Each structure stands twice: as structure tokens, then as C-alpha cells.
Amino acid sequence: MVIVYTSQDQIYAEPIFAEFTKQTGIKVRAAYDSEAVKTVGLVNRLIAEKNHPQCDLFWNNEELRTRQLEKQGLLRQTNSWESFGFRKRQLVINTNQLKNPNCPRTLLALTNEVCRGKVALAYPLFGTTATHFLGLRETLGETNWQSWCRALAANKPLLVDGNSVVVKLVGSGDAWVGLTDSDDVRAGKREGLPIEGIDLREFDFFIRNTVSVIRNAPHPEAAQKLFEFLQSGAINEKLCSAGAVEGFAARGVSITPPTIDWERLVRDQEAGMTQLKQIFLR
């Protein structure tokens, strides 16, 4: 048996685990997160279990929290984590707004007063939205970032519990445009929602899937097998076909833009989160 905590959507992860069990005979017991507190709940659980680990492997669908766990000594000392696929942050727009000149097409335009109350985003204290906002803090610089965040909050965005909800709000027409992940845009289009995804040309942001083995994992040999399995080309192809990732991105493979100083981002994470709470507290 191998025990996995994962923030990957269950609809994508379950078939992968079933295939692993079929090939190896090793059963997978998985704990998934909730849409509202994406990743953060599982990370807090891992931290709480540090002295008595219950989990073998953490499949995280973003990078920041994995690096946080590494810095705090919760991952095994050698070959602790790897990335194996990426998504993109995107704007999602209702197709009825494609000809609307007032509908934002850039991150900075989300603060335009003309779209007040017409922008949707996941509450930026969790998941990829939090990671994206903290990455923007590194890119824009402290002063410009705070100004943008405050202007965005003042524009009364629709703050919701997760990126998939953002897509649904835009699809229903309750919002003109939203900030979300590329896999959620794909899922919405499969459901027939009238939406299109727009790449963030001025502040592109790529999100790596990561897999890590917990220090003192209760089933280290099984964990290593699943660690290797998730990085295989066949699994990346399955995830790409399903729309969970855009392509392959190993830890040593550069994805540009952006160039993020991850060491500094992890170091300054708590300060950035405190500022986000003050600005977007609902």
C-alpha cells in the first residue's frame, strides 16, 4: 500500500492511481483536498504529522507549497521532489464579451473601473491563485504589487471558492472575465460553457505539478515506485490528453517566462500572505 495526499483534481488522479495498482499490485489510499482551500489544508496536515508521518507521497498540483515543505524539512533528504507537468494561469472570458472593448484582456486591466463587479477570481489565499499572486509580488515589486492588489480589491471582484467556480461564473455571464487555470478553462469548454481562455502575455505564469516523498514515510519502497511512475512519459501523455496539464516540465527544465526567485518567494511567503489577508479579507 502507498498513502498519497494530493491536490490534483480527483477526476484526473483516480485513473492514474488505478493504472499504478494494475501495473504494480500496490494499492493506493488517497486523501484529496477541498476546492476552497486547495493545497493549504493538506500542507497543514503534513506539518501537523511531521513527527509521526502518516503520508508517503505528496502529489501537489503547484510548486510553492512543495518548496515550503522542503525548506521545513518534511521531505526526504535526497531526490526529495520532482515536477512532471505544467498548466498555465489564464484569463477566461465569456464569448458574449469578446467584442466588448471594455472587457479586460490583461491582468492590469482587471482594475479598470468599467469592469467593477464583473471580474471573478478564487480567494487569493489558497491554491494556484495564492501562488500566482505571490509570484506577481516578486515580478512587480512590493509597491506596485500592493497598489495593484488594492485597486483590484476596490473594484469589487467576485471572490469565490476555487478556479472551477470562476469558470462557471464567467460561463453563466455573472462575470465578464475571470482569473483561473488552463485546465479549468478546458473543463468548462468540455461542459459546453460559452468561454475562451486568454494567455497572460504580459505576466505569464506557469504552474508545475510536483511529486515528493515524505521524510520517514511509512511505506518508502512503494512511495518510490509511485514517485517514478508519475514522472513517466506515459502518465504525462494521459494527463495531457485529459486536459490536466499542458505539457511536460521536469524540475530541471526551464519554463519561461517568468523567472521566479523561488528561494526568496518561499522566504517572503508569510509576509505576502499577511498582506493578501489584509487586502482581500472577506
Image: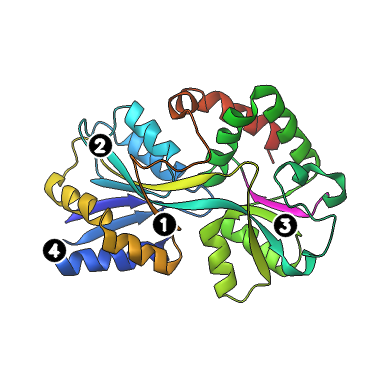
Quadrant containing the N terminus in the rendered view: bottom left
Whether the residues at callouts 1 and 4 have beta carbons within 8 Å, the answer is no
User: Label 3, on which residue?
Assistant: 177
The local secondary structure at tag 1 comes to strand
> Magenta stretch: residue 133 in it?
no
Q: Toward the viewer: 271 or 240?
A: 240
Q: Name the kind of residue labelled 2 in the image.
A: Ser
| Residue at the right extreme of this rendering | 114
Q: In the rendered image, which quarter is residue 14 located in?
A: bottom left
Q: Position of residue 181 (x, y in %)?
A: 55, 54
Q: Which residue is mark 4?
A: 24
The span from disc 4 to disc 2 (Cα, nearest Å) is 22 Å
Position in image of residue 40 (x %, y %): 46, 42
Q: Cα distance, mark 1 to mark 2? A: 22 Å
Q: Using the image as rendered, state which of residue 203 and residue 38 is in the foreground.
A: 203
Marks 3/4: CA–CA distance: 44 Å
Q: CA distance from mark 3 to mark 2?
A: 38 Å
Q: Which residues are magenta?
A: 116-123
Kindly identify the amino acid type of the residue bearing the numbered disc 1: Gly
Mark 3, other Cα within 10 Å: few <14 / some 14–19 / many ≥20: many
Residue hosting label 1: 247
Specify the quadrant of the image occupied by residue 239: bottom left
Label 2 residue SS:
loop
